[in-house]
Image (tube, rainbow, N blue to C red):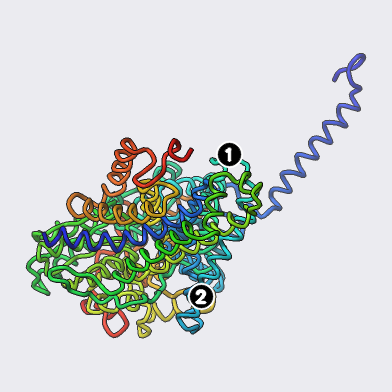
Amino acid sequence: MASGHGLKPRTVALRLSVVALVVVMMSGWNRASTSAPATNGPGVTKTTITFGQTAPQSGPAALYGESTNGVRAYFSYINSKGGVLHGHKLKLISYDDMYSPAVSVELTRKLVDQDHVFAEVAVNGSATNKANLTIQTPANVPLIGSQTGASFLQPFVKNVYNVWPAYTIEGKLLANYGSKKLHLKRIGVLYQNDDFGKSLLQGVHDANITTATEQSYEPTQTDFSPQVQALKSKNADGVIILAIPGATTAFLKAMAAVNYKPVRLMSQVAAIPEQFSLSPQMFPGSYLGAFVPPPTDKKNKQVKTFLAAMNKYEPAKPTSVFAEWGWMEAQVAVAGLKLITGSITPNSYENALNRLKKFHFMGGTISYSSLSHLGLKHMFMEKAAAGKLVQITR
Amino acid sequence: MVDFGQYIIHGLAFGAIYALVALGFNLIFKTTGVVNFAAGAMGTAVTMILWSTLDRSVPLAAAWLIAMAAALLIGVLTEAIFMQRVERSPVLIQIVVTLGLLLVIEGAVNRIWGAEPKLIPSLASSKALAIGSWYTSANDIFIMALTLSLAGVLYLALERTRYGLAMRAVAQDREVAALMGIRSFRYVTASWAVGVLVAGVGAVLFVPLYGGGLVPTMMDNVAVFAFAAAVLGGFGSLAGAVVGGFLIGIFSNLVGGYLSTDLEVSLIFLLIVLVLYVRPQGLFGVDAKTRL
């Protein structure tokens, strides 16, 4: 120890002791804080696991934001039963991305870099999901239930666990039902001019039918008379509508305006109850693809649980098919959590999800493996009749 | 030929809506030199107020009156709270304020009324009406007639009344008008009130026309086309707004029908560039030399 011109040994010892005491106190404070052991991943504390979500709460697809209510209801339902993994409660941070890929990717960056979420769930949109992967995949953020069946997620993306069936399945179902069951001879198609619409259109092509015409539209479009004219001039006796709800309704109105009433087959994304009142002439009698039971099907046990939970935890929020989407994606997310052994990290979560086999939930049954993260493989048809959607195929 | 005629008829109906919103733009621009980019969002807010009153079983006529009163109030408050403060600022600042208002109003509408599409009844029957091989409806005809009537009334008010003369004086030179004893702020406020009212009428009529339901972003596309109509027709010209609106409506339908709907906006603005190249003040605008 220095002496003479330097500090006295006793002073140095005293100062070092103070420093050591502070260091010990700070490490003790950290341990006493709510943060989890250092081996757990981001978004995990001693008492909570935080999921992130981006979904449109405003903009042209704002209805899809109702899925947030479904996720929250399911998380509340699980939390009320004691949570998961020895009492961890589930939290959701959800941001409005306005159905814009540019906005969505910035919000995803925020979720990952600032909010440090453990995983993401029920992220809506094809173009938005595609943009978000540029953040999620390098950061290895597990994503359960991207709300799209677009081709870029098939057959396998390491950190993405699909719940929705691929859009190609839906497009093929609609085309086959139209041509083989309804015996339509000249089927036209209206599709949204992006990954969502084009993936569904690919499914229509996979059914090997010859379409009379294929008309694209932009998500913000309000005047559909050109597309209707094109379909009418080709004498299409059936039209497959691969469109979001607002566009579907406007398109139906444009058909009614020229007294054109072909058979209508629609994607499940357009299944809003308001269609009955907004399109009283054209929506009844339409056929829709589906992979969740309609929320009016109160005989279905899964639906009953969903409705009860929504009533309790998200009262006054619409119990729509979009809320059902969020609910069932949260079901899969939680099922994966329950299989985690050891530390709660993104890797252990992905390993757990890869072991999920024949999990029965609102959408049916789902299994994953380390080589396949495909979602539901089956869809069925519904028909709009008497003010509700009725299942007509299994 | 059938398709061509049908595109024209549909284009006229939608064009009438663009004309109404463009009239709203031009009324405000005429007295203040400001383009109200929030016109579409304000129109949506007015329509939501109409829906709320109808939802409470208020009779249609009374609901309309309440909504139109709300439109006037929105215009007055916008001018008093926001635009007066930036009156002497560069025009760019004033435009940015209206752009900000667009986002604020749209966000507020979404928060208050939500995104579920809502029904607004048409004032005339929307049932398809066959005219030879073409189709229209009583509602479409009504919208076109109302647009022309409203434009006519506004034109007469501006050109044939003392109030219109005062408004034109304020538009030409606010300070000189004040020196002549004209209370400029009254006419500026009035132009905002009536401008929002006209845009509100356009928005309310648009809901049953396009059929997609009343949603917060309903007028976004309409506002773009209405702006194009105002530019094409000549900013500040009421006749220009109407003619521009109908022309844009027809042109966009023809482009969508014969080419692609993807190309509508880009070709519309190409058309504008070409027209402005030949006639910079727009079809009916008055150039600066003539004004002086």
Q: Residues within 10 Å of mark 2 (few under 14, many from 20)?
A: few
Left or right? Give the position of B33 relative to A175: right
Left or right? Give the position of B79 relative to B234: right
Image location (x, y in percent) of residue A39: 56, 48
Q: Nearer the viewer, residue A250 or A123?
A: A250
Image location (x, y in percent) of residue B235: 43, 47
Identify the residue under disc 2. Answer: B65
Kind of element beneath mark 1:
loop
Q: Nearer the viewer, residue A337 or B102?
A: B102
Q: Nearer the viewer, residue A226 or A6?
A: A226
Classify A19 as above or below A227.
above
Q: Residues within 10 Å of mark 1 (few under 14, many from 20)?
A: few
Q: CA distance from mark 1 to mark 2?
A: 36 Å
**Residue farthest toward the top in the current orientation of the protein:** A5
Image location (x, y in percent) of residue B264: 28, 49
Identify the residue under disc 1. Answer: B90
The amino acid type of the residue labelled 1 equals Pro
Left or right? Give the position of A217 relative to B42: left
Subunit under mark 2 = B
Q: Quadrant of the N terminus of chain A?
A: top right
Left or right? Give the position of A279 relative to B204: left
Q: Quadrant of the C terminus of chain A?
A: bottom left
